[in-house]
Every structure is written in C-alpha cells, then in structure tokens.
Amino acid sequence: MSEEEVFYHSRAKVPAEQTSLDTQVGGDHYKSMAIQPIEFIQKNQLPYCEAAVIKYVCRHRRKNGRQDVEKAIHFLEMLLEMEYGYHETNDFDVYQALAEETAIYPTLGHTIVYPALGLNGEAGEVAEKVKKLCRDSDWLTSPVPHLSAQFKESLKKELGDVLWYVSEVARQAGLTLSEVANTNIEKLSKRKQNGTIGGSGDDR
Ligand SMILES: [Mg+2]
C-alpha cells in the first residue's frame, strides 16, 4: 500500500477519530469533499499560487460562484507573470493593461481621438516600410522574394505600434482587447462558413 493509500485508508478506518479536517469554519464546502484541497495541496507540497488555484476551483460551485473562478484565473495570471513573464503569454488583456501603463497622451476632445489618430499614423508607417522595400530593392521582381532579418525587425516594431494604438482605442471605448480579437475571429469564421469571406460589406 502506498503512502497515500495508507493515509486515506487510515482516515476511513477510524471515522471516530476527529482531525482538524473534520471541522470547517464558515461552511462545509471543503469538508464535504472526498479529498479536501488542503490535503491534496499539503501532500503534494504545492506552492501558494497553485494551491490558491486549486482551492478556488474546488469551491466555486458551493461558495462564491463566478468570483471564485475569477480569483483562480487571477492567481494563474500572477503565476504566469512571476514565472514566465508577461511577454510569453498570449493574453490580449494582459497586453492591454501593460499598454495602458505607458499611455500618456493629451486629451484632444474625447480621449479616443488621440489614439485613433495615432493608429492611422502607425498603420501608415507599416505601409511606408513596405513601400520603401519595393522602391529600394528588387524584392517585387525577385523570383524568390526574401524579407531580410533587418526588415522584419523594423516591421515588428511598427506592427507593435499599431497594436498599441488598437489596444488604446479599444480601452478608451470601454472594450477589452480580447473581446475585439474574439469578435473578429467569430465574424471571420462565420463568413468562411457562409462562403462570404471574399465579398464586401460589414454584415455578410
Ligand atoms: Mg512607429
């Protein structure tokens, strides 16, 4: 019998023996579980963030519903940030929060005006890069068009500028970047399904 089996078997064999796990302050959402989160966490010596995620995921249906799920997600975000760094996540909303930290610009009328103008300017800079590529190299006529590492690096920066302004325009309109991204994918998926991806008009 493994160490774990001995642990749970011994508890099951002596129901009369009270342990601190038989008591719960403020509810029974842990106590009524076959294995309580604290038992699993202690036996596996899980660090704080992982432990908190397990705790909130296990209790949300019996305690705080959506808020517990959101807390679990928040701990996962902190875990990602602390162990892997922001930039290795694909989370649009994390990006948007970071972009906001560097959003220092004047208010021109409504706050959406400045980033909307900036978005147009940065989109133009992307087009300018491609224009110069066509003008200053044989890229257009080359039988095997090749983008240099230098070009890709400079394009990456300009596309990042575009992304920053997209994020800020969305934020000023009260939209999260993830809902913008998801709505776009849903829209295009629907068009692909309907065979209208190559047409024109917003609602097709
Ligand atoms: Mg730029």
Image (tube, rainbow, N blue to C red):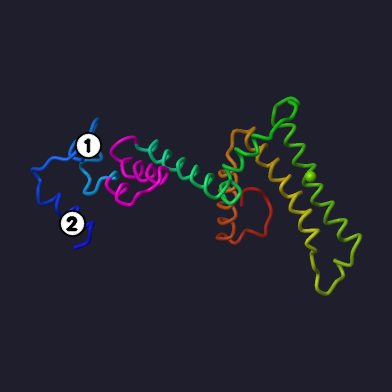
Q: Which mark is residue 172?
A: none
Is 147 left, or right, of 27 in this rendering?
right
Task: Name the amino acid, label 2.
Answer: Val
Residue sitting nearer the eye, 112 or 88:
88
| Image position of 62 with respect to 138: above or below | above
| Image position of 171 with respect to 203: above or below | above
- Direction bottom: furthest residue: 143
Rendered-image quadrant of the N terminus: bottom left
What range of the chain is rendered magenta?
Answer: 39-64
Toward which corner of the image does residue 58 lie, by quadrant? top left
Majority SS type along the magenta span: helix
Count residues near mark 1 (Cα–Cα under 10 Å), then give few for <14, some for 14-19, many for 20+: some
Count residues near mark 2 (Cα–Cα under 10 Å), then give few for <14, some for 14-19, many for 20+: few
Residue sitting nearer the eye, 100 or 52:
52
Q: Which residue is mark 2?
A: 6
Is 32 left, or right, of 181 in this rendering?
left
Residue 193 picture location, percent across and down: 55, 60
Residue 74 picture location, percent across and down: 46, 40
- Which quadrant of the figure shows ligand 1? top right
Residue 6 picture location, percent across and down: 18, 56
Answer whether residue 134 is magenta in the image. Answer: no
Q: Identify the residue shown where x is 80% and y is 63%.
A: 148
Task: Name the amino acid, label 1.
Answer: Asp
